[in-house]
Amino acid sequence: MKSLIIAEKPSVAADLARALGKVPKQKDHYENDRYVISSAVGHVVELRMPEDIDKKKYGFWRLDALPIIPETFELKPIESSKDRFNQLKKLLARKDIDEVINACDAGREGELIFNYLYQLTKCRLPVQRAWIQTMTPQGIRTAFERLRSAEEMAGLGDAARCRSESDWLIGINGTRAITKRMFGSRAGNVASVGRVQTPTLALIVGREHDIRSFQPRDYWRVTATFQVAAGQYEGTYQRPDFRKNDDEHDRADRLWDLAAAEAVLAACQGQPLARVSEEKKAATQAAPRLYDLTTLQREANSRLGLSARRTLQVAQALYERHKVISYPRTDSRALPEDYIPTCRDALTQLSGELAPHAARVLDSGWVRPNKRIFNNAQISDHFAIIPTTQSAAKLDGIEAKVFDMIARRFVAVFHPAAEFAITTRTSEVGPHRFKTEGKVLTSPGWLAVYGRTSIDEDESAAGGAASNSSADGTAEAATDGSSPAKPTGKNKSLPALSPEDSAPASTSPPAQAQARTLAAELHAEATKPPPRYTEATLLTAMETAGKLLDAEELAEAMKERGLGTPATRADTIDGLINQRYLEREGRELAPTPKAEQLLEFLTAIKAEALTSPAMTGEWEFKLRQMEQRHFARADFMAEIVEQTKALVENVKTFEEDAASGRETAILSPTDGLPLRETLRAYKSQDGALSIYKVIGGRKMSEDEIAALVRERQIGPLDGFVSAKTRARFAASLKLVHDAEADKWKTELDFGDKVDLGSLTPLWRDEKTGAELCEAGPHFVLREKRGEDWEQTFRVGRLMCQKPIGPEHAIQLVSQGKTELIQGFISKRGRPFDAFLTRDGARIRWEFPPRAPRVGKDGKPVARKTKAPPDLSQASVLGPSKLHRGGELVQTADAYYVRKPEEDGRIVFELKRQLCQQEIPPAEVQKLVTDGKSGLIEGFVSKRGTQFSAYLVLSPKKNKADFEFPPR
C-alpha cells in the first residue's frame, strides 16, 4: 500500500519528490512503491455562494433576503482548477492508497486548502500532517520523520474553517446590505466590507480625519552657538518648568509664548559667558530581534519601497524556489531552543561581505542560549525567518536585497550590544539653560555587521534598527511630523572641555567651565498633523489592532489580537486598493471618497463589529486560542452569526431623516431655504435639488458646493476619477435645471457641447483669423471653415493640478511652446516643471535638463544611464496600429515597438517569455492592433499556480498588463 502526499502547489510536489528518494514522475503526479505525490494549485475548492445555494432567491441582491446564514456551509470545486480537483479525487479513490499526508503550506490557509479538498471528495482515509519549516531536502525529510496526527491538527483546522465561514457571513451579508442601502440598484457600485478589511480601512480613514481636523499651534525654539577652546557647539534652550503631560506636542525645547522666546534670545546678545557643566554616561543598544513577516514587510517598504504583497512574494520565492530561508509566513521573532547547531551550520554557509562577520560569531562562541533569540515560549508552529544552509550566491536583483536583509539581521543578532559614550552638556546663560548631547560609538558590536564604525555615519545603514519607533511605525521623536531638534547636536561628538575653559576661580580639571555665546537664533515653527499611513506603518497598526504601543513586550502581547495574520495582511491592503478604497500616493496610503462614504454610513448605523479594530482583534485572538484547542468552534461561530444578524438589522432599520440634517448656509435656488447636509448629499428642503458629496469619484468640499449653487457652475476642478480606468481628469461642473422633471442636477462639463460661434475670443491670429476662446475646462482654438467654426486645437485650463492661464494658452498657439511652467504635480504627488509644446492637435511635455545629482561631498554625481537595446538585428513583424508611426519588431528575448521617424525611439516593450510562457508573435500583433490579445493559457505564477489571462495594452501603451477572464 502507498501514501498519497498532497502539496499545495506543483513546484513543492517536485521538491518533495526529489527529497524523498527521487520519486519518478508519472504523467500528472510522482510515484514509486511507497509514495504517490501530487498537488493542488492553491485553493481548488471554495464555499458555495448564495446564488449557488438558491439562484432564484439569492441571485438578485435584495434586503428582504438577508441575512443569509446557511445551516451548513457547502463546498464546490473552483471552476478554473476543476481539472486539478478531479485528478486529486481520482488519486484519493485509488485502492492502493491507504493514507493521505497533508503537505500543504504549514499554516491556517494550507490546512484549509487540504481540509476542503478532503471534505468535498468525501475521502475517509486516515490523515497525517507534514509540517515543513524549511524547503531544503533535509528540512523536508525531517518533517516526514515527524509527521503529526489528525488529532494534533484539529484545532488549526477548526480555526481555518471559522476564518473562512466568518469572512463569508460578514462579507456576503454586509456587502449586500450596505450596497443596497448606499447605492440602491445603480450598476457597478459595490460597497464591499469584510471582517478584517473594513476595520483596517477605519484606521486609515480615522487618520485622514485627524489630519484634516488638525489645528496647528505656533511655537518657538531658541538655539545658541557656543565657543570653547577646542571648537564650537550648538545648544537648544530647555524650559525649566517642563513636565511630561498629556499634550503630545509639548517638548522641553518648545516655547509657546513669543515674548518668552524673545526674552531668552535677548539674554544671549553681546556674547555673554555661559556656565558649562556636563554629565557623561555609558549606554548600550542590543541588536534588533530576528524578522517575522510583518517586520520584514515593514522594513522592506521603508528601505526598498516594496509593497507588503511584493515582499511576501519575494520571501516566498526565497523559501520555495531558492530554499535559502525558512518559512516566511510567521509571526514569531524567536527560534526553538534546540536550534543552536542549525544556526551554526547556517552561519558557516554565508558568503561574500557577511562571511567575516559570521566567522567572528562562530570563533567568539556567541551562538549560545539567549532568551531573546532561542525561546520556546515565543514560538508556536513557526519560528523567526532565518537563512538556511543553502547557498544564496546566485541570487540577484530584489531577491538578493531581501535575502541580505534577512541574513544580515541573522548575523547581527548574535553580536554583542553596541556601546556608546553619551555626554549631556548644559550651558547656562543667566537663568537660561541650553542642552547639547554628544554621542560617541565606543564599541560597534552588532552595528559592525551594517558597516557602522562611528555614530555620524548614515543611520539607515542599520536598516532602521537603531530608531526608536512607536507601534504605529512613526519615529517617536517626530510624532507630530515636525523635524527633529537638529541643532542640539545629538548623536555627534562634542569639542572637549579643557583647562583653558575653566572659570578664573577654578582649577584643572575644570569643575566649572565657561563658554562664550557667539550667536543665538529664534526658530518660528508650528506643530504638524500625524503623517498618513504607509504600508510599513499600517502593517504595525494592523499587528496591534491600532493600539499605539511603545514597549516591545506589550506589542508582542498584542500580536495575538491583531487584524488578520502575517500571511493575509498584504492581501488585505492590496484588496482595499483594488476595490478603490485606497490609493497609493508615493509611499503614502490615502483613502478615496468611496472609503469615507462607507465609513460615514457604518458609523451612522453603529456597525461597531465592522469598524472596531479592537473587536476584530479579539476575534483573531479567539481564532488563535482555537488553534491551541482553548476555544470552541461552535462558540466562535455563534458570536459571528449574532454579529451578522445585528449588522443586517441595523442596516435594514436605519432611516435617515433629511429634515434632521445639519442646516448649512447655502441657500437653495429652488425654495430660497438653506440646504441640509445628509450622509451622502446636500439637499433642498423642497426635494427639488440634491447635490452628492462625491461626484465622479471626487469629494466636493462645502465651499465648492456653495460656489456651484451660487454661480450655477464651477471649475475646472482636478481630481475626478474615471470609473473604468481609474485615471484622474479635470472637468467643470454645471448645475442644470430639468424642466420636465422640475428637478436640478449636476453635470460634468468637458467643454465639448458648446456652440463655438457663441464663444468670446481671448486672442486672434491676424494672419489666419484663428481665435482662442475659453470653453468650460479648456481653451479652444477655432478656425473658420466656410460659414462654420471648427475646433482645431484645445488645451486644458488645469493640467496636473496646475492652472494654465490665458497667457500660456496664447504662447502655445502663437509660438508652439510655452515658457517654463513651474508647479505641476505628478500622479505620484511629486512636483515638476515643464514646457508645453504643440504638435498639431496634440500637446507634448518638454522637460528642462535635470539638475546634477550632488553627493555627500557636495560634488556632482554622474547619473547611470541604461543602455538602450540593440535593435539593428531585430526582425520586423509589421506596423503597430495603436502607436502612431510605430513598427513592431522582435529580438531574441523581447518584442519592441519603435518609431523610425523619431530616431527609433522605443515606445513599447514586452518580454518574449512571461511567467514561464512563450508569447506568440501573432498575439503581440493582435495586442498592438486591438489593444488586447486572445486568451493565453499556461502562465505560471510565482507561487507555482497555472493561470490563463489576456494581455492588454497599459493606459500609457508602453507595456502589457494582465486581464483575467471571469471565474
Image: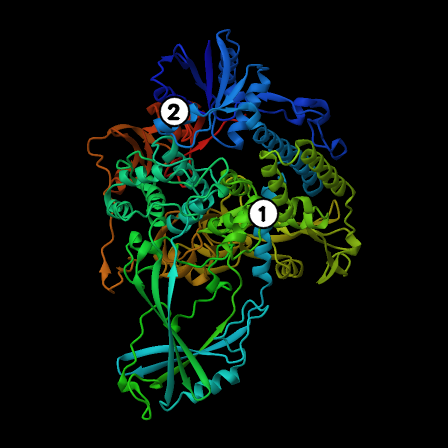
**Vertical order, 747 against 285 (above or below):** above
Name the one closer to the observer, 376 or 432.
Answer: 376
Q: Position of residue 12 (x, y in %)?
A: 40, 25
**Would you identify the image quadrant in which residue 22 lies?**
top left
Could one spot residue 696 in this view of the protein? no
The quadrant of the picture occupied by the C terminus is top right
Q: Position of residue 810 (x, y in %)?
A: 41, 60
Could one spot residue 734 in this view of the protein? yes
Whether residue 805 sits left or right of residue 241 in the image: it is left
First in sequence: mark 1 or mark 2?
2
Residue 222's disc number: none
Q: Position of residue 525 (x, y in %)?
A: 48, 73
Residue at the (38%, 34%) spot, across then down = 319
Local crowd size for mark 2, using a 10 Å CA cut-off: few (<14), some (14–19), many (≥20) = some
Residue at the (50%, 8%) spot, across then down = 94
Residue at the (44%, 85%) spot, across then down = 265
Please name the residue that numbered disc 2 is placed on: 141
Q: Amino acid at mark 1?
A: Leu
Q: Amino acid at mark 2?
A: Arg
Name the one closer to the observer, 156 or 321.
Answer: 156
Residue 201's disc number: 1
Q: Residue furthest left?
A: 872
Mark 1 to mark 2 CA distance (whole Å) = 43 Å
